[in-house]
Image (spheres, grey):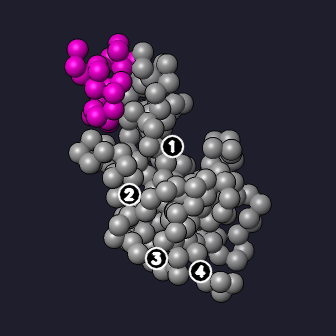
Amino acid sequence: MANKLFAGVDEVGRGCLAGPVVSCVVILKKNIKKKLLKDSKMVSFKDRLYIADHIKKNSWFSIGVASVSEIDKYNIFNASLLSMERAIKKLKKKPDLYLIDGTHGPKKIKNFKTVIKGDQKIKCISAASIVAKVFRDLYMIKLGNKFPQYNWQKNFGYGTLQHLNALKKFGISNYHRKSYRPVHNILSK
């Protein structure tokens, strides 16, 4: 096992009311500073930006995205797997084994192992978590500049009280997940 090449895979944005679900796959190079690698939820936004940059310079990585329309069409579970599959297919370097955070992996990928709370236990999954989160957060900040009423620059599309109140006041955008109950309920009125 010592000489095997592992890739970490994680996705972010499953619980959001708006925006895509994003997955990242990362193979760490030897010069990575492993002490920086933690679950993305345990790292401040500012630190994630720095760490994501370090990871990208010291690894092989790729990003996969599933759109809001794909989330609404296939459901979040299948859209998450689709974003993982896209990230894995785009990765130039191929590992011996993909270590995927959670309990499921894409059916078309054969050489994987799932790890519950993998983003807290395995450095390459932590790295994938950080890069995916930064990619998605920056996307939502950019989108938030076009739709300031939803405050995506701060809530990144999650269902905060302010976001829910904005939905009630301003209605939904094309970037909202219509299959999600709070958004669907507003559409149903």
Q: Are the two marked residues, 3 and 4, in contact with CB atoms closer than 8 angstroms?
A: no
Tag 4: Cα neighbours inside 10 Å, few (<14), some, or many (≥20)?
Answer: some
Please identify the residue farthest to the bottom as the structure is shown.
Answer: 3
Q: Which residue is mark 4?
A: 5
Q: Residue at x 70, y 69 (%)?
A: 32
For the residue pair 21 and 113, the one nearer the viewer reads as: 113
Q: Is residue 128 among what the camera can see?
A: no
Gap between marks 2 and 4 measured at Cα: 22 Å
Tag 3: Cα neighbours inside 10 Å, few (<14), some, or many (≥20)?
Answer: few
Which of the two discs, 1 and 3, sits closer to the camera? 3
Considering only order in the chain, which callout, 1 or 2, is on the residue closer to the N terminus?
Answer: 2
Three-letter code, disc 3: Asn
What's drawn in magenta, residue-wise? 166-189
**Is 90 left, or right, of 112 in this rendering?**
left
Q: Which residue is mark 2?
A: 81
**Quadrant occupied by the N terminus:** bottom right
Q: Residue at x 23, y 45 (%)?
A: 73
Gap between marks 1 and 3 measured at Cα: 29 Å
Determine whether the residue tagged by mark 3 lies in a helix, strand or loop: loop
Considering only order in the chain, which callout, 4 or 2, is on the residue closer to the N terminus?
Answer: 4
Q: Which residue is mark 1?
A: 137
Considering only order in the chain, which callout, 3 or 1, is on the residue closer to the N terminus?
Answer: 3
Q: Which residue is mark 3?
A: 111
Residue 85 placement (x, y as % from top left)? 38, 65
Gap between marks 3 and 4 measured at Cα: 12 Å
Considering only order in the chain, which callout, 4 or 3, is on the residue closer to the N terminus?
Answer: 4
